[in-house]
Image (cartoon, rainbow, N blue to C red):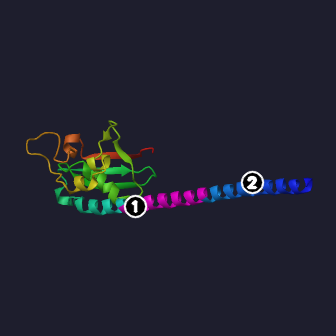
Amino acid sequence: MDRLLAFRRLREQQDREYELAMKLDRKKQRLKKEKEEERKRLKEEKLEKLRARANLRDMLKVKLMNEPVSDNVADCTRCVIRMPNGSKFNRIFCMDSPMEQLYIFLMVNDESLNDFRINTNCPRREIPPPKFLLTNQAEASISGSSSSSSDGDDVGDDGGMTFRQFGFSKSEALFVAILEA
């Protein structure tokens, strides 16, 4: 009888250990599945951000004004824009063009830019970013008009200043600063 009782206790202990091991295995599998789902979700979010960025870039290409022709550069500013990686862009802008054209030009020409600001060299000033970089309403801001208002104030319809209003000279050295996440 003692032997039967000992056998039964051993069997119960083995069953408890087996159930515990099964419970731990199920938990591991559940955690593994959750991690895989999280990985997939993050990957989808990243792809969606890339698609949205590509759509934004396509819309910005349409909004980017043509560079002024050489016989019409008297009322223009020549900008040399240095990137954080050491490369540089040269571009001529009309003095009465909205400042957002500078940001649009960079976003169209450099795919690596996400969250950035542009600074002048001397005197050191930050060029304010356009509304579409500050909000998630990029399509509304981009599709809106960017002409200056007729009453002569410092702000155009899109809320941005022109190169002239910002105080640009005939030639400007600009620097792109990447904002930390």
Looking at the image, tell me whether mark 1 or mark 2 is earlier in sequence order.
2
| Residue 48 - label | 1
Tell me residue 21's x, y (percent).
72, 56
Tell me residue 84's x, y (percent).
44, 49
Does the CB distance between marks 1 and 2 fall below 8 Å? no
Q: Nearer the viewer, residue 14 or 48?
A: 14
| Residue 103 - label | none
In the image, the segment drawn in magenta is: 30-51
Residue 3, by quadrant, is: bottom right
Residue located at (57% from left, 60% from top):
33
Query: What is the magenta segment's predominant secondary structure?
Result: helix
Residue located at (35% from left, 62% from top):
54
Q: Nearer the viewer, residue 105 or 81?
A: 105
Q: Secondary structure at mark 2?
A: helix
* Amino acid type, callout 1: Glu
Residue 25, by quadrant, is: bottom right
Residue located at (35% from left, 50% from top):
81
The answer to whether 157 appears left or right of 7 in the picture is left
